[in-house]
Amino acid sequence: MAEAQSVKVMSYNIRFDNPGDGENAWPNRIQKVAHVIQKYGPDLIGIQEALHHQLEDLTRVLPDYTYVGVGRDDGKEKGEYSAVFYRNSRFGVLHSETIWLSPSGEVGSIGWDAAITRIATCARLYDRELKQEFLVANTHFDHVGKQARIGSAVLLAGYLSGMHQVRQPLLLTGDFNCERTEETYTHLLKIANGLTDTRPTNDATGTYCGFEVGAMECKAIDHIFYSSEWVLRHYQVITDNDGKHYPSDHLPVLAELGLSNSK
């Protein structure tokens, strides 16, 4: 009997185009990042830190994909995106929007003790293979403000729980800048009547490693969560590198999930 259809989801902080990264600057990494995506073939990718031209570069070298999302600085093309990158032959976008993670929610606003503006991009997709609508959200929490991370998790929980009231499956990807031991993580698990982390409880593989292989102890701060309508089939942290450097300073996380009612 053929295995029921599934969706492969990736969360990937591709590192913004910083010329100061030298040999790891974006023009030297475009093909490396694209190769990882081509090799592992995710259907959906929550991409963090991408500037507009980086997303355009990726859609140029990966024409099977497109994206939804806006820049965090002006709600258009300025600043980093938390984009939902998707395989355009498989998904139709029914609705998408970006929210600002701050008490005011105003475009470009900074919340709590955050160092910079933070956003989440949410989309309601129709999956032509699963013949199912579902929600996907992608975000990047602040790297400095502890209260900002907690506040962002609570705000996002309220927003996504409201969207999930129609009981459509939900996937949440992101660089949350928090490990499992932190309060932020606990709030994330409470979203939409309870989310589950795709990372197995006994898996301590880190995801934020810096560019140089073995130069630092990796921290597990990139996560993919799923609602109860899904069943996890596979999880991995992708450690591909050229022997010296990773394609980004974060390792991509990949999960494969099927619907719990699939036969």
Image (spheres, grey):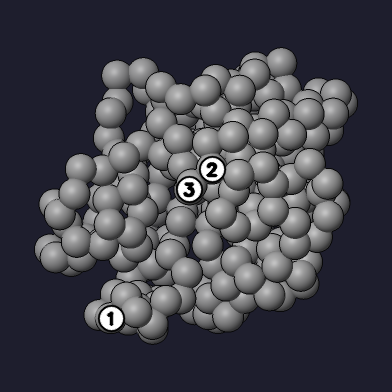
Q: Amino acid at mark 1?
A: Gly
Q: Earlier in the sequence, mark 1 or mark 2?
A: 1
Seen at 33% across and 59% down, the residue is: 249
Give me the disc on residue 22: 1
| Residue 105 higher or lower than 257, as above or below | below
Asked whether residue 30 is in view, the answer is yes
Pinpoint residue 98: horizontal percent, then vertical percent: 77, 54
Name the residue at 81% across, 48% down: 105
* Image location of residue 219, percent across then percent down: 31, 40
Q: What is the secondary structure assignment of the residue under circle 1?
A: helix
- Which quadrant holds residue 247? bottom left
The residue at which mark 2 appears reads as 145
Instruction: Specify whether residue 5 is in view.
Output: no
Question: Which quarter shows the C terminus?
Answer: top right
Q: Position of residue 58 (x, y in %)?
A: 52, 74
Label 3, on which residue?
143
